[in-house]
Amino acid sequence: MTIQRLYSFIRKGLDDYHMIAPGDKIAIGISGGKDSLALLHGLAGLRRFYPVPFELVAISVSLGFEGMDFSPIETLCQELSVPYYIVNTDISTIIFDDRKESNPCSLCAKMRKGALNEKAKELGCNKVAYGHHKDDIIETFFMSMIYEGRIHSFSPITYLDRMDLTVIRPMLYLTESDVIGFQNKYALPVVKNKCPADGNTKREYIKNLIASINHETPGVKNRIFTAMVTQNISGWGGKRDA
């Protein structure tokens, strides 16, 4: 996937849901994975010609695992003229050593988001951008039904009233295969996740389940996404009016 196509998909998400207002300062959450790095490229490029002016910063939350090297991301941010910040935490020690969590992902995500949001507020940001794509959204929809018994998923825009921050997800129209194509074409400096639970999660199980269903019934993923956009599930409600 070319960078022009990346811009097109991200801009469609921004425009359809009016994610950006004049003067916004947006913190991009950079995990080190392909999704957040693609979002960094997309928003940094769009910033130059998007009709609504906005500022960007990039933030990574270090969980405390040994061997995590964010220097390639720092270099990329310098090339893209995006200020970059690393928040050092002891999340890995708390989860795996102190609490010995058998299902660590939910607590880890909560703590990571908390650290990211606090840094975003400290830097004067009013919005945080996550690199969730269409596949993430569909997988979360399935996880909510199967494990929680409710109809729910990430929404394009979420207001966090306790933090007075708005979360935006500009990559909602991109599939994971789109992002992989962009990663391969532009050699994104992905930083490998050192978490021992990586690749062995409920989300990975759901990802494989959906892939199997989509293989047997081609187009199922797109139809699920269309239903989410058009059937007024919580947090979606269709595109916003201009």
Image: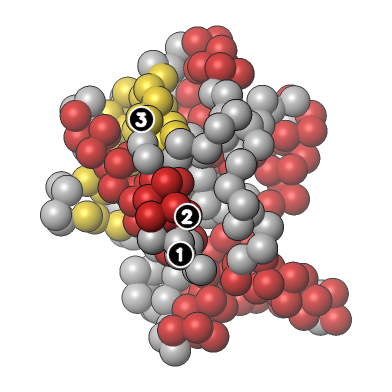
The residue sitting at the bottom extreme is 149
Q: Earlier in the sequence, mark 2 or mark 3?
A: 3
User: For the point 30% across and 41% down, which residue is it?
Assistant: 115
For residue 201, above or below residue 196 = below
Where is residue 185 shown, x and y percent of the image?
79, 29
**Mark in the foreground, 1 or 3:** 1
User: For the point 81% across and 81% down, which residue is it?
Assistant: 217
User: For the point 65% across and 73% down, which residue is it?
Assistant: 206
Q: Quadrant of residue 162?
A: bottom left
Q: Are marks 1 and 2 in contact (CB under 8 Å)?
A: yes
Q: Nearer the viewer, residue 34 or 51?
A: 34
Q: Which residue is under mark 2?
A: 96
Q: Earlier in the sequence, mark 1 or mark 3?
A: 3
Mark 1: amino acid = Glu
Q: Which residue is under mark 3?
A: 87
Q: Is residue 205 left or right of residue 195?
A: right
Secondary structure, mark 1, is: loop
Mark 3: amino acid = Val
User: For the point 32% across and 23% down, which residue is it?
Assistant: 55
Q: Is residue 149 left or right of residue 1?
A: left
Q: Nearer the viewer, residue 12 or 34?
A: 34
Residue 220 is marked as none
Q: Which residue is under mark 1?
A: 101
Mark 2: amino acid = Phe
The answer, for residue 226, to whether it is visible in the render is no
For residue 236, above or below residue 124 = below
Q: Is residue 141 left or right of residue 51?
A: right
Secondary structure, mark 3, is: strand
Count of labels in the image: 3
